[in-house]
């Protein structure tokens, strides 16, 4: 169902991609808190150039995702996307753009299974310090943050023209993937029913992320009628964890 895949950029535009990708790939400009500033550690010594090289070294590459077609992602956000990301991050209490040194996004890797689309990608952000990465991680794992995601996604989907598709309420579930050697992780699934011409399918948006010092990494995937298989998610997530360990900030 092609219409269902249009919801992937919709969620990103709603700021779900901004808050979920990279434990909160922060767009909102917020002031540094005394606690966060005092906790600045070795990450503060990173230059923007080194931070970008680090993010790119960790991100997924085409060779990691065999059997999928790599599609380059846009390198910029629209005014609407930035505004929605700002609203979500302000609601959830995430850190801000002013504290981010660099960000890298992989290509979108796509395939079809039984005629239904699946997609997976990754994003890596490097903050000025571990404290800001932990602030984002706390926001995404909190009940407050998840209420904000569901509220804004539901509201914006109701307001959008999705080519005749009728979208039901978004639900969210949480888990914690194993990430030994990192400084914390999160797992979220957003699911929603989509009806087109009397046929109803379910779309699944999975986000697995972790922090490693000032580095924030997220694996995001989309599946229609079934999520991207857990074995693939676990493998790719493991690749990202190992790369983050091999490239300490």
Image (spheres, rainbow, N blue to C red):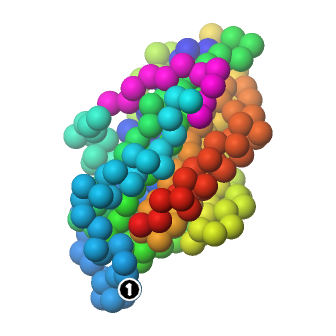
Residue at x 35% of width, y 82% of height: 40
Residue at x 35% of width, y 65% of height: 127
Region rendered in magenta: 64-74
Decide which of 131, 65 is in the foreground and name it: 65
In this rendering, is residue 19 above or below 9? below
Farthest front residue in view? 246
In this rendering, is residue 168 above or below 188? above
Quadrant of the frame with the N terminus: top right
Q: Position of residue 50 (x, y in %)?
A: 30, 58
Residue indicated by mark 1: 39
Based on the picture, tell me whether residue 69 belongs to the magenta stretch: yes
| Residue 174 relative to residue 80: left or right | right
Magenta stretch, main secondary structure, is loop
| Residue 193 relative to residue 146: left or right | right
Q: Residue 131, located in which quarter of the rendered image?
A: bottom left
Q: Position of residue 118 (x, y in %)?
A: 63, 25
Residue at x 57% of width, y 72% of height: 183
Based on the picture, tell me whether residue 156 belongs to the magenta stretch: no
Q: Position of residue 140 (x, y in %)?
A: 52, 62
Q: Residue 28: in sight, yes or no?
A: no
Quadrant of the frame with the C terminus: bottom left
The crowd level at tag 1 (other Cα within 10 Å; few <14, some 14-19, many 20+) is few
Q: Residue 136, located in which quarter of the rendered image?
A: bottom left
Decide which of 166, 118 is in the foreground and name it: 118
Q: Position of residue 108 (x, y in %)?
A: 48, 29
Q: Residue 241, located in which quarter of the rendered image?
A: bottom right
């Amino acid at each position: 169902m092609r219409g269902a895949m249009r919801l992937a950029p919709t969620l990103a535009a709603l700021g779900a991609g901004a808050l979920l990708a990279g434990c909160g790939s922060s767009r909102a400009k917020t002031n540094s808190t005394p606690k966060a500033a005092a906790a600045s550690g070795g990450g503060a010594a990173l230059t923007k150039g080194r931070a970008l090289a680090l993010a790119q070294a960790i991100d997924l590459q085409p060779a990691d995702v065999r059997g999928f077609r790599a599609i380059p992602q846009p390198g910029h956000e629209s005014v609407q996307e930035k505004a929605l990301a700002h609203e979500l991050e302000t609601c959830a209490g995430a850190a801000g753009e002013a504290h981010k040194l660099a960000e890298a996004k992989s290509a979108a890797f796509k395939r079809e299974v039984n005629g239904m689309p699946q997609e997976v990608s990754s994003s890596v952000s490097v903050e000025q310090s571990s404290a800001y990465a932990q602030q984002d991680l706390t926001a995404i794992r909190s009940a407050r943050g998840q209420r904000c995601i569901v509220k804004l996604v539901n509201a914006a989907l109701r307001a959008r023209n999705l080519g005749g598709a009728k979208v039901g309420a978004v639900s969210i579930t949480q888990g914690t993937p194993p990430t030994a050697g990192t400084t914390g992780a999160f797992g979220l699934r957003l699911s929603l029913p989509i009806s087109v011409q009397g046929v109803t399918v379910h779309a699944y948006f999975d986000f697995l992320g972790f922090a490693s010092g000032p580095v924030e990494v997220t694996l995001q995937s989309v599946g229609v009628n079934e999520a991207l298989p857990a074995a693939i998610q676990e493998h790719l997530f493991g690749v990202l964890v190992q790369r983050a360990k091999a490239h300490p900030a």
